[in-house]
Amino acid sequence: MEIAATKRELLASKHRVSSNTRRDKVNFHDQHAIITGGSSGIGRATARLLTRRGAHVSIVARRQGPLDETLAELEPLRGSQSQRLRAYSADLADWEQTRQAIAALTTDGPPPDILVNAAGVTHPGYFEELPLDIFHTMMDVDFFGTLHPIKAVLPVMMERRSGHIVNISSMAGFMGVFGYTAYSAAKFAVRGFSDVLRAEMKPYGIRVSVVFPPDTDTPQLHYENQFKPLETRRIAGTAKTLTADQVAQAIVRGIEQRRAYILPGFDAWLYSLLLNGFVGLTRWYFDRIVAQVRRERGVE
């Protein structure tokens, strides 16, 4: 009974925090959302949701087949024929391919308003048994596959002084989890990068969010379950697995509420509360310092 009561109190607290941060909702109609990893899992679910909300949606992924399948799925969700849906095949770990993809999607179309970086891979295992190429792959896809699209869209966003970048980390990027030495390292990198980028882009009116999903029922989860050590499976069993649609809903809600940290599900929110309760206060303090220095430098 006491545990149930405590959980109810925490949920009520979460609702109060969410309510206190709520502002005028973002109107996605005619906004151009570029979604990497948009042909599968969380990216595909986010593409569906933003299409329903009236956004122009462009998806980027490596394989053309799943991209075509996703476009066919999005087509009946359009609100009007003027709503643009496009796909581009590119390896986001490759800077030149990424640059060409973003250029193609923005030169012959509306400028980017929203970038959701949902491309990612994972391969759990015991550290001593994982080959080095797994670590390089995690960084190439999960970190540089996030950095490259941002580097490509940022000049336009900075010139327009608007935009919202959403990077998907993981709860394994919030707290190190047994069996994820390669994955956690890459996802912690995404988190740290996003925190710094958020501070640097704030003066330009560009928002940066980072998402920390728990285990999510996607093809990627089914793949990684083949390699999870027993200890990792036991740990995963202590938290609820979300659907890709649930995470996508949290992402869109986080964009609407202009949240820096997007925490899908109660477990993610609770872990973040326990582990990182003072991040918001620290961020506010650092923002004040940055604003003061920019005033001293005469930079707006």
Image (cartoon, rainbow, N blue to C red):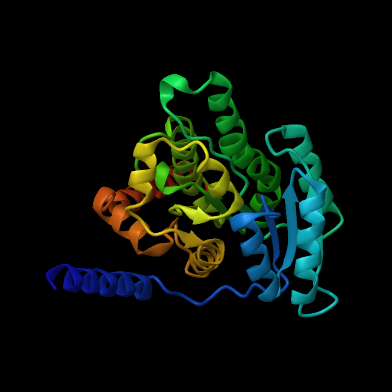
What residue is rendered at 49% in x and 23% in y? 130
Q: Which of 114/234 is in front?
A: 234
**Above or below 246: residue 133:** above
Q: Is residue 116 left or right of residue 184?
A: right
Expressed as whole percent of the image width and height from the top left, the position of residue 224 reads 53, 41
The quarter of the picture where the N terminus appears is bottom left
Q: Does residue 58 appear in this view? A: yes
Q: Residue drawn 43% across and 35% down?
A: 180
- Whether residue 115 is visible to the viewer of this picture, yes or no, is no
Give the x, y percent position of residue 239.
Answer: 35, 55
- Residue at image x 48%, y 40%? 187
Return the residue nearer the eye: 51 or 203.
Answer: 51
Residue farthest along the bottom direction in this orientation: 79
Residue toward you, 285 or 61: 61
Q: How many marks?
A: 0
- Indicate the position of residue 236 as horizontal and vertical percent values: 38, 48
- Depth check, front residue: 6 or 50: 6
Q: Quadrant of residue 293?
A: top left
Which quadrant holds residue 87?
Answer: bottom right
